[in-house]
Structures are given as C-alpha cells and as structure tokens.
Image (spheres, grey):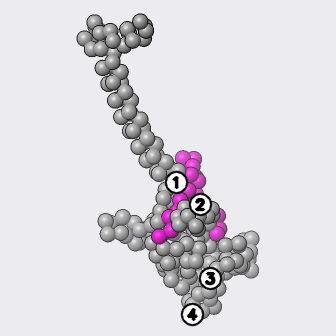
Amino acid sequence: MDPDTIITDTVNTMTGKSPKKQDNAWSFFSTIAIILGAILVAGLMMWFVFRSYQVDGPSMQTTLHNNDRLIIWKVPRTWARITGHTYIPNRGDIIVFAERGLTTPDGNSKELIKRVIGLPGDRVVVENGKTRVYNTEHPDGFNPDTALPYGENLNLAMDPEEKIDENVGDNQVFVMGDNRNNSLDSRIFGPVDAKDIVGKLVLRVFPLSDAKRF
C-alpha cells in the first residue's frame, strides 16, 4: 500500500483530527493570507509606486484627451520623502498634484494634471501670447514651449491680452495646461507646492490605439 496514503488517512491521536482536515484548514488559511497579502501589496503599490488616473476635461489637449487612462509614477516623490528631500520634477514633465484651493464634493483637494513650466527660482512671464522664463542660467529669458520637445506639435498660443509675472519660490513649480486658452493652472492659482505633487505621467494605457510612454 502506498505509504503516503497511510499517513494521510491516519488519525492524529494528539488532536483527534485527521491530517486531511488539518491540511484543508491550512489550505484555507493560506489562501486567505495570500489574498490579504495581495491586497496589501496592491495598496502599497498604489500608495508609493504608481496610480491609475482617468483624464476629465480638455485642459491638456491635444496631448491628452478626455477619458484617457493614465499611469502616474510616484517612486521619485516617495523616495524623496523617505530620504528627507523635496521632489522637484523636470521642466516639461506632466504631473498630477492636489490643488488645495479646489475641493471635490466630498471635501478633498481636487487633483489636476498639468505640465511643469517653471522651477524653483524661476520668474515666469506671460505676455503677448507667449511664455518666457527667466533664471540665473537664462538672464535674458527663454520660451520653454519652443526650447523643449513637448511644444513641437502643440498650439500653445494664449490670449495676447493675458499678462502674468510670477516668481516661483523654493520647493514650488509653475504649471500650465497644454490647452492654454482652456486651462485652470498656475496663471490662476499660483505655483504648486512640491509637497502637493502626486507623481508624474509615464504612460497612457487607454485607448489602446493611443498608448504612449511619456
């Protein structure tokens, strides 16, 4: 007779329970542990690594469109917090952040997605329908919309009557939507504090025909 079968069918004289029942109980609790572990890992991934968002509104057209499904990368911000540093994205990055001056119906800060135009220490000037950034490296100023690759295929013209002159403080960034004439951004509510940045856009996953890395 198969010795494994003998062991399986033998009653445990110490507990009064058969090993088969013990195996079933162990299998049940193992399954529960795996499920709880998976939920915990998923939660940690969403909290510290990445998060999925759906675009709501036209402020980033034509780069992003309403209902696009995005992946926001949170690791740089998470690592900055762990090491006690401030996370400052690169100029031209598209970021998600919480705007404390705007609230959702449930009272939370509204999260927006915009492009980083100005960095700490910059002076951002909007005039005559153009954006110009002044800093120590560019005392005469430069237009990020033409100096960086993101602006190659975008119409970033603005109202020629609009005038903005804003200094970006330490641990802040100045953000604007790519749809400049239909965007609520730093021209309205000022620079964004780095502590309010959720992460930066790395991937559009839906619609599949427009999937793209950023």
Q: Are marks 4 and 2 in contact (CB under 8 Å)?
A: no
Give the residue at mark 4: 161
Residue 75 lies, in percent from the top left, at: 56, 51
Label 1 environment density (alpha carbons within 10 Å; few <14, some 14–19, many ≥20):
many
Q: Nearer the viewer, residue 147 or 43?
A: 43
Instruction: Report whether residue 197 is seen.
Output: no
Work out which quarter of the rendered image holds the N terminus and state it: top left
Q: Secondary structure at mark 2?
A: strand
- Which circle's residue, 4 or 2, is located before the other in the chain? 4
Q: Is residue 211 magenta?
A: no
Please name the residue shown 36% across and 13% down the image.
8
Query: Up-down: is 185 above or below 77?
Result: below
The circle drawn on residue 202 is 2
Q: The magenta stretch spans which residues?
A: 67-92
Q: Which amino acid does the dot numbered 4 rest on?
A: Glu
- Which circle's residue, 3 or 4, is located before the other in the chain? 3
Q: Quadrant of residue 107?
A: bottom left
Q: Which amino acid does the dot numbered 3 rest on?
A: Leu
Q: Is residue 83 magenta?
A: yes
**Circle nearer the viewer, 2 or 3:** 2
Give the residue at mark 1: 50
Please name the residue shown 54% across and 47% down the image.
82
Label 3 environment density (alpha carbons within 10 Å; few <14, some 14–19, many ≥20):
some
